[in-house]
């Protein structure tokens, strides 16, 4: 799931931090996560501008990746390169510790931080840093300070960090709270004016290639005077297909879907006329009310899709129906992942589907999302990641976990997309089944 920040480490990191080396769940693996502090960690990292894992300094023991003061191992980088990426990790800092995690790092003549923006790892209290300083822990170093909502654990205790880079948006999370958000790149992948201005006003203004790489390595800094340990480091390539991915929409037509629009059926008119495909985008006109549903049943899976409302027509309503069973009708028995503008991430229980949701956020059949601010403005693409894992359903909007239900009836069912009064567009609808 993903952590409440998230989507990060699907269903595992949400719980309390434990001392046992973590492992990936089936849902984690289906969502594309890989564990970078497991037994094979040395095959996933190498030294910066080196062929292999450092021979000194860095250690891999008991599921931890660590370095001590004066270790001399140099910066670590992932062997793989990433564009859109999500990384979650637990970190422990010694007194006055100073390090960082860089992203989109290129191997140039200079050090890693001369191309890769940094999630700062600093032991604020003993270092004497103001928590909201642009060089403080979880800052986007020298560019964006962490928000005042930031909380850190005392020296020597484990914290949870997360970096989320998707569709031009960069987020830093610390202990379950989003503390930095930057619109770094536009839809074409070019740096935004906001991002360019930030770089121009920073210490990196003369660093050629800083913060503008289309892809690159993730790096962990060896600052030379730091005691640092990381564990449960999970990384996933958000631009890559899901493991065992099944495409539910071919970008051309409604193959694999059945349209259900009772008003049109009563007039003996084609129920598919509410839907059209244009330039690889599935467009729902919104009226009359109804849905399309998959022809096949699915029980447990990770489902990803992107949606947006037509900016010329304004916000609207729709939903993704999960485990739909029984007769086709408006609306069929199912669990609804809400798509109404401003309320994406809500649950709706349709026709008394068996499930348990947070009582303090539930009113009748509706369970409100945990917080605001995850949706993009009308007209921009949003991404839903829905984890349907046995009796648990998790709703993640643009990388943020907004809702979770347990005790959900485990039954094979259809996946539906609603036509509910407004034009809505869908693309990149795909599913990774859980074993």
Image (cartoon, helix red, strand yellow):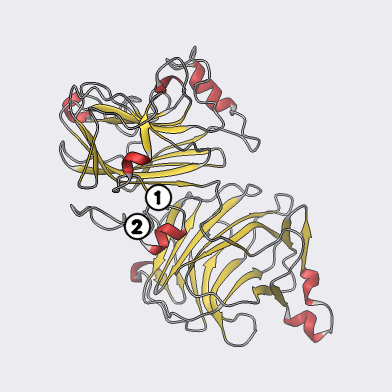
Q: Quadrant of residue 88?
A: top left
Q: Closer to the camera, 55 or 377?
A: 55
Q: Is residue 6 left or right of residue 262?
A: left
Residue 246 horizontal/vertical position (percent): 59, 63
Viewer-side residue, 342 vs 209: 209
Q: At 68% from the left edge and 73% from the top edge, which residue is drawn?
A: 292
Q: Residue furthest top?
A: 206
Does residue 56 appear left or right of residue 32 in this picture? left
Question: To which residue does mark 1 refer?
Answer: 34
**In the displayed structure image, the side of residue 188 where residue 89 appears, left or right:** left
Instruction: Give the quarter of the image for residue 415.
Output: bottom right
Which image quarter is the N terminus in?
Answer: bottom left
Q: Is disc 1 surrounded by few (<14), some (14 to 19) or many (20+) residues within 10 Å?
A: many
Q: Is residue 208 left or right of residue 313?
A: left
- The disc placed on residue 59 is none
The residue that disc 2 covers is 24
Answer whether labels 2 and 1 touch (C-beta < 8 Å).
yes
Residue 203 drawn at (x, y percent): 42, 15
Query: Which of the two residues, 59 or 433, is positioned nearer the viewer here?
Result: 59
Q: Would residue 247 be seen by someone viewing this image from the given angle?
A: yes
Q: Which of 134 and 76 is in front in this view?
A: 76
């Amino acid at each position: 799931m993903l952590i409440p920040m998230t989507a990060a480490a699907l269903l595992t990191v949400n719980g309390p931090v434990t001392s046992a080396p973590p492992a990936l769940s089936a849902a984690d693996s289906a969502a594309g996560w890989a564990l970078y502090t497991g037994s094979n960690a040395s095959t996933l990292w190498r030294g910066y501008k080196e062929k292999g894992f450092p021979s000194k300094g860095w250690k891999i023991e008991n599921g931890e990746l660590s370095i001590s003061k004066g270790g001399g191992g140099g910066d670590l980088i992932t062997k793989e390169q990433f564009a859109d990426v999500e990384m979650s990790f637990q970190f422990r800092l010694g007194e006055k510790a100073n390090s960082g995690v860089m992203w989109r790092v290129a191997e140039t003549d200079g050090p890693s931080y001369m191309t890769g923006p940094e999630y700062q790892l600093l032991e604020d209290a003993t270092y004497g840093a103001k928590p909201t300083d642009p060089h403080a822990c979880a800052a986007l170093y020298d560019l964006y300070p962490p928000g005042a909502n930031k909380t850190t654990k005392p020296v020597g205790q484990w914290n949870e960090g997360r970096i989320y880079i998707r569709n031009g948006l960069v987020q830093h999370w610390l202990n379950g709270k989003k503390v930095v958000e930057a619109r770094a790149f536009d839809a074409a992948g070019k740096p935004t004016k906001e991002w360019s201005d930030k770089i121009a006003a920073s210490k990196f203004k003369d660093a050629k290639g800083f913060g503008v790489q289309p892809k690159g390595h993730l790096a962990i800094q060896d600052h030379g005077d730091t005691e640092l340990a990381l564990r449960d480091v999970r990384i996933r390539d958000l631009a890559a297909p899901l493991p065992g991915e099944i495409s539910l929409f071919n970008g051309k037509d409604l193959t694999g879907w059945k349209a259900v629009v009772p008003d049109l059926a009563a007039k003996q008119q084609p129920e598919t006329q509410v839907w059209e495909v244009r330039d690889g985008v599935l467009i729902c006109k919104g009226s009359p009310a109804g849905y399309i549903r998959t022809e096949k049943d699915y029980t447990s899976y990770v489902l990803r899709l992107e949606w947006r409302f037509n900016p010329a027509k304004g916000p609207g309503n729709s939903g993704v129906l999960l485990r739909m069973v029984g007769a086709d009708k408006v609306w069929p028995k199912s669990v609804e992942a809400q798509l109404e503008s401003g309320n994406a991430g809500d649950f709706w229980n349709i026709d008394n589907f068996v499930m348990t949701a947070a009582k303090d956020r539930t009113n009748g059949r509706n369970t409100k999302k945990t917080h605001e601010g995850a949706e993009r403005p009308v007209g921009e693409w949003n991404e839903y990641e829905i984890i349907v894992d046995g009796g648990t359903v998790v709703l993640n909007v643009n990388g943020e976990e907004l809702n979770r239900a347990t005790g959900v009836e485990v039954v094979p069912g259809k996946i539906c997309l609603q036509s509910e009064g407004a034009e809505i567009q869908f693309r990149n609808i795909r599913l990774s089944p859980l074993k």
